[in-house]
Image: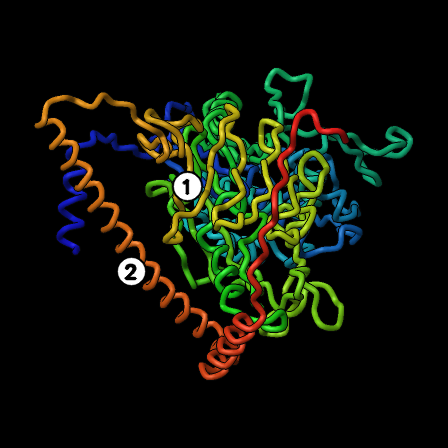
Amino acid sequence: MKRLFALCLAFALCAVPMTAWAAPAWPSGVTIQADGGIVMEAGTGTVLYGKNMDHPYYPASITKILTALIVIESCDLNEIVTFSHDAVYNVEEDSSSAGIDEGDQLTVRDCLYALLLASANESANALAEHVSGTREAFADLMNQRAASLGCTGSHFANPSGLNDENHYTTAHDMARIAQAAIQNPTFVEICSSRTYRLPNMKRAPVEKYPDGFPIANHHKMWNRNDAAYYNGAFCGKTGYTSLAGNTLVTCAKRGDMTLIAVVLNGHLTHYTDTKAMLDFGFGNFQSLKISEFETTYTSLDNDMTIAGMTAKDTISLDLDEDSRIVIPKSAGFSDAVPHLSYTLDRNAPSNAIAQVNYTYGDQPVGRSYLLLGGVGGADGSGQAADGTDGGQAADGSNGNSGSQAADGSNGNGSSLAADGSNANNAGPASDGSNGSNSGGQAADGSNGNGSNGGPAPDGSNANNASPSPDGSNANSASLASDGSNADSGSGASGLIPPGGGGGKPGGGSPNTATSFKIPSNLAAVLGIAASLAVITAIIVAVKLYVRRRQEAMALQRRQRRIQRLEDIGYSTAEFERIMEQYRSSTTSSYTPPGKRSRRKRFPFRRS
């Protein structure tokens, strides 16, 4: 049978011309004048463009991003910092200063404003002494924190970024540090401020400065009155020394994407280089919510339900609602390849049992955690037996962790979308469809989830996914009979490939009729008959293949269910007992539906 199937398939491939469809190439075409640079998407860590991004350079004052992050994590903002002689005077001549003098006492909050807005080196020294006692001890803390963020090419020797041959970093490492910093709302609040007034300074007496000594942010890209203004820029840090050249970190947000651009060893083109990288990122890439497109792993939940588990025993598996991937705008979700891994990183939620990593070619583009939902109620509401919300996972933890996501939103997916609407309004409806339509907004303002998204009664996925930027459907996501995704995405820019719909190359509707003229020549008739025979053989072979594959997959699912049940304390015998109870109850309680008569409606019948 396998040989017959292979022969029929070979005949079909030879008889029907086909076009090979490959994922669109990763965008290129941006150049910068600086020696090193990178633009990275903050939510996923996807590197969109890099130039010498892992080569070490002197960072200058962008070092203060890491200094500020450590201070915010270590101190109360109302603590008092006393400026020592060493903190004020152990700096390079003519380096950045906020005019703070020896003996001045400011709060940690005041010092952070001086650090990030005025780039005050005396403030960096004083904060380091306040946290660790000495600048050297604080530098050790900086290196430990950088390593925890995944930095591999950096070494920090002081909190200010002043010239030191042992003080260096890479563009990629600085992007990672900025990625962690903008997850802290206190950092963003201070760093994005345009001006601030420092109180209680010897060099700024109250008589002259009754409201405090004014300082201003050195970064120009969110100053509307400056030529370097960039729409969406909200946070960052400038830097310059004679050895480091111009350095710049800039964060900008548009729609669903937040980009981080880093410039190292710039040559007075740091703002134009940054603009070029940000324009490249926003113009060529899109951010897609994984849970709105991925159907492969959510079917594990359906397996457990079909197995006949009672409401008490139901185990649900869900994809992280906030996870996304970033891919070219000309690509579809199916062009990203998922890889299931049971090795969890340190950021994994407590109820995660695996993670799905996505790549585009060789480029990592995002990930999602596979979460253990815990014990579900009979109506799918997620309530435990005592009426509390969410139920508990197998380890006793709450099935809904409620921890905050990196952007400060609630980790259970109930955060507000950009337009203020709830990103996850409701649970599944009684017919199995998802009650939430909002799903957040896409970058063009369209609704991120165009339909209910639950499985339809015939097993196909009712979620047509987010529309592409041109308004076409990016992913129909219906399931094939063997459980695979029958159509995982549209072609370039969401366009339907030549030859028909369905999102497949050359694929039209299987029900499309082809009109032809029956020839009078007997040879042509015999040829048609032979073709029909071959097609029939192919159909039979495919059906047999699908049936065998379904049986094999059913066996695999059964083994997985048994394994998962054993992991949480159920034995194989208990599983078989539950299955037998389910089959007997289903057989005894099933009643075939009665036929409903349909009355004809006549156009002239009186009502």
Label 1 sits on a secondary structure element that is loop
Provide the residue designation for mark 2: 548
Instruction: Report the side of 18 relative to 23 (left or right).
Output: left
Q: Nearer the viewer, residue 14 or 204?
A: 14
Mark 1 is surrounded, within 10 Å at the Cα level, by few (under 14), some (14 to 19) or many (20 or more) other residues, namely: many
* Image position, residue 79 (x, y; %): 78, 54
Residue 58: tell me if it is visible: no
- Circle 1: residue type: Ser
Q: Quadrant of residue 32?
A: top left
Label 2 sits on a secondary structure element that is helix
In front: label 1 or label 2 = 2
Q: Quadrant of residue 92?
A: top right
In the orientation shown, which residue stands out farthest toward the left? Answer: 523
Q: Nearer the viewer, residue 437 or 81?
A: 437
Provide the residue designation for mark 1: 488
Instruction: Report the side of 268 relative to 432 (left or right).
Output: left
* Image position, residue 186 (x, y; %): 71, 45
Q: Nearer the viewer, residue 332 or 145?
A: 332
Instruction: Report the side of 166 relative to 456 (left or right).
Output: left
Mark 2 is surrounded, within 10 Å at the Cα level, by few (under 14), some (14 to 19) or many (20 or more) other residues, namely: few
- Circle 2: residue type: Arg
> Which residue is painted at 16% across and 56% down in the image?
1
